[in-house]
Image (cartoon, rainbow, N blue to C red):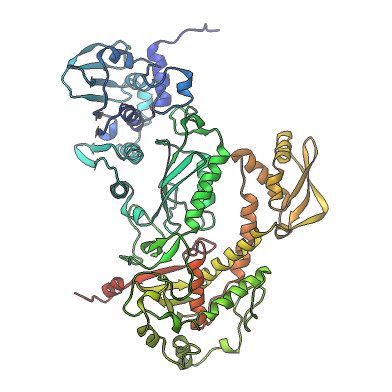
């Protein structure tokens, strides 16, 4: 049996390099983080052949004094921490002191630096052979330049695993992009094979920060993003989140920073996914650039070799904070007439493919407003509708409201109109909805009760500018599917089924969660066999189950008994649901499976209860639907994540007909 030997410094560094230096992008990440920790305000990155041949990083930071240059190339040598207390509250990007030693062991590295206040610059070289270094004078301004050549030249097996030049540079560019998003006050320049890729100047205000975002992530992201800046319980969350209609087929436009450090964390991903759950199309991923600031002592960054993962001291608090704040911002989005869209439909952006809707191109407001007359909804229009002339139409609002309330058992005034299903709110087939001659159908589109048969377009021409609501007023229905409305911006097109589906769904949720969830005892209780730790977890999480009408009791060391379930889930697979909840609690410390399952059933009920295609609506009913959309949370998407409306501005219409040319 071989004896135990102490590894040579060179071999130890190459082993460490296997964790730290995976590819050229890993080298750039470590060196740029060192520059940022040195308080640099300008970083220049020059790359050749994807970084395999040459990487040069130059900064204007504090620099390294002569006596520390050789020590900087040693393992576990750092100026960033000195005691255990420093490690427990790390405030720098780097802290282990392994990067330079690991990089120099698998490459030819030259480091030149001039410290602040020093008269001379000094240079040190390492060739990946022995770890001895020699320091000699050099010419250099304040700051540090590190040049890394021939990566993995002395480890051919690792060099074979590198990808093509284009692939390696894409990974490297992503690293620069993340760091540029983490520090807006620092300038970044990136060039590849002599061609400049980025030249980002330092910024200190919101406008220029968004310009940097547009440069790095595409203008589409900024055009379809909502800003967020909230603070509570010692946590601050700020940044940008994409509208639900601006989603991706993969999670490649998601950036999350904790105290300036980019991280990929399961807890964060779960909280964001939960916040978007009700509004994303199946299989799509949200987009966001978010920054979480908290006390460094409450987060452990020393849990992963590349520091991409973190551990929060109070993960439940962080999870609930992220979910609640993002969920509220998405829910509070309301359409408000203002900026007109610059285009409609068309091919998706080459960098960011969004779903084909123009909701995001309108201005948005965060607080719902009343749909009653006299409220200024948005910018004036030449031909808006006066509030007093459409109050007859708004009578339909009361009808639709009461229909949904009846479906939920909510008490409301007034009688249920004929032709409406009192249980689902669905508009039923009746004599009034039977096929009519073409002339009568056209008259239905343009006439409304109480106006002596006057055409809708006549009413439009007489109205006051300040009474125009965000989604305007209905003028027609197309093939029993879409509602056309005129707004101060132009033309609004609404999918009536999708819109009504969301309205009914939100009302059902509000009624369901406004009171304690009704439960029903099981005639035969369900015994579930679990592990001892899972049984302990169930015993400690009674409040989670009780909040959704479950009564789950521990009956043995490795068993629990389900005695009551919520009425809405009475026909579901209770045993598997309980197991899934326990698993979710074990992994994430929290669960939303019970709420998700209840919402799924309510969404299905709302889908079946919403007005169906090929139902002829009166102008009053169409306007009532528009008004409901304006005050309903998440009304921009149906329960399945599909958009509910889009718009064409007057400029878009002019372009279609080549007007003004």
Q: Single out the residue that lies furthest toward the front.
A: 374
User: x%, y% of residue 162?
Assistant: 35, 32
Give the vertical position of 614 relative to 117 (above or below).
below
**Which residue shows up at 20% across the image and 17% down it?**
118
527 or 330, which lies in front? 330
In the foreground, 568 or 391: 391
- Viewer-nearest residue: 99 or 258: 258
Residue 519 in the image: state x and y as whole percent: 75, 57
Instruction: Examine the rendering and report whether any part of residue 576 can be seen.
Output: no
Q: Does residue 376 show up?
A: yes
Q: How many marks?
A: 0
Relative to 595, does residue 108 appear above or below in the rendering? above
Q: Residue at x 40, y 26 (%)?
A: 20
Q: Quadrant of the C terminus?
A: bottom left
Image height of 114 relative to 91, above or below: above
Residue 425 image position (x, y, % from top left): 62, 74
Quadrant assignment for the N terminus: top right
Along the viewing direction, whichever of 332 and 600 lies nearer the viewer: 332
The residue at the far right in this view is 523
* Quarter of image, res 137: top left
Left or right: 140 with respect to 397?
Answer: left
Residue ranking furthest to the left: 139
Q: Residue at x 39, y 20 (%)?
A: 98
Taking the image as shown, residue 453 lies to the left or right of residue 316, namely: left
């Amino acid at each position: 049996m071989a004896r135990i030997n102490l590894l040579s410094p060179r071999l130890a560094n190459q082993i460490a390099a296997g964790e730290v230096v995976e590819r050229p992008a890993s080298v750039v990440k470590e060196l740029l983080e060192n520059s940022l920790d040195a308080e640099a305000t300008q970083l220049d990155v020059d790359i050749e052949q994807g970084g395999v041949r040459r990487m040069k990083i130059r900064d204007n930071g504090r620099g390294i004094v002569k006596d520390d240059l050789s020590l900087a190339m040693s393992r576990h040598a750092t100026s960033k921490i000195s005691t255990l207390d420093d490690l427990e509250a790390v405030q720098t990007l780097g802290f282990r002191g392994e990067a330079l030693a690991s990089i120099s062991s698998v490459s030819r590295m030259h480091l030149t630096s001039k410290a602040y206040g020093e008269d001379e610059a000094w240079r040190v070289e390492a060739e990946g052979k022995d770890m001895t270094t020699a320091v000699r004078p050099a010419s250099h301004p304040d700051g540090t330049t590190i040049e890394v050549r021939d990566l993995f030249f002395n480890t051919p097996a690792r060099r074979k695993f590198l990808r093509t030049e284009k692939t390696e540079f894409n990974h490297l560019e992503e690293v620069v992009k993340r760091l540029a998003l983490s520090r807006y006050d620092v300038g970044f320049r990136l060039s590849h094979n002599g061609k400049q890729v980025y030249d980002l100047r330092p910024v200190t205000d919101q406008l220029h920060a968004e310009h940097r975002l547009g440069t790095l992530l595409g203008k589409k992201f900024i055009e379809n993003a909502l800003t967020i800046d909230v603070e509570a319980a010692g946590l601050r969350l700020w940044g940008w989140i994409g509208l639900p209609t601006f989603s991706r087929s993969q999670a490649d436009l998601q950036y999350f920073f904790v105290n300036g450090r980019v991280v990929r964390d399961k807890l964060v991903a779960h909280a964001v996914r939960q916040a978007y759950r009700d509004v994303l199309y199946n299989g799509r991923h949200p987009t966001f650039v978010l920054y979480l600031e908290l006390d460094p002592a409450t987060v452990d960054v020393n849990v992963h070799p590349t520091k991409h993962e973190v551990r929060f001291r109070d993960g439940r608090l962080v999870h609930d904070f992220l979910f609640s704040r993002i969920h509220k911002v998405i829910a509070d989005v309301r359409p408000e007439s203002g900026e007109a869209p610059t285009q409609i439909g068309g091919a998706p952006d080459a960098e960011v493919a969004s779903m084909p809707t123009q909701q995001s191109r309108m201005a948005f407001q965060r607080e719902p407003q009343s749909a009653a007359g006299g409220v200024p909804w948005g910018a004036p229009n030449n031909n808006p509708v006066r509030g007093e002339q459409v109050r007859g139409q708004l009578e339909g609002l009361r009808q639709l409201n009461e229909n949904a309330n009846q479906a939920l058992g909510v008490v409301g005034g007034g009688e249920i109109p004929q032709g409406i299903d009192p249980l689902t709110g669905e508009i039923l087939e009746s004599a009034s909805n039977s096929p009519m001659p073409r002339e009568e159908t056209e008259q239905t589109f343009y006439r409304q009760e109480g106006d002596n048969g006057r055409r809708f377009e006549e009413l439009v021409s007489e109205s006051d500018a300040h009474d125009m609501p965000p989604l305007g007023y209905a003028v027609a229905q197309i093939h029993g599917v879409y509602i056309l409305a005129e707004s101060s911006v132009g033309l609004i097109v609404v999918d009536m089924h999708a819109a009504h589906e969301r309205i009914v769904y939100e009302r059902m949720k509000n009624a369901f969660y406004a009171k304690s969830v009704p439960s029903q005892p099981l005639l035969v209780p369900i015994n579930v066999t679990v592990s001892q730790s899972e049984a302990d977890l169930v015993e400690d999480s009674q409040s989670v189950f009780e909040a959704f009408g479950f009564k789950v009791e521990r009956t043995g060391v490795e068993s629990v008994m389900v005695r009551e379930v919520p009425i809405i889930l009475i026909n579901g697979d209770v045993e598997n649901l309980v197991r899934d909840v326990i698993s979710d609690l074990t992994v994430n410390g929290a669960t939303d499976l019970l709420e998700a399952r209840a919402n799924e059933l309510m969404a299905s009920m709302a889908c079946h209860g919403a007005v169906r295609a090929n139902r002829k609506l009166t102008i009053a009913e169409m306007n009532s639907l528009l008004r409901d959309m304006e005050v309903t949370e998440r009304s921009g998407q149906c329960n399945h994540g599909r958009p509910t409306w889009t718009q064409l501005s007057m400029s878009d219409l002019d372009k279609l007909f080549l007007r003004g040319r």
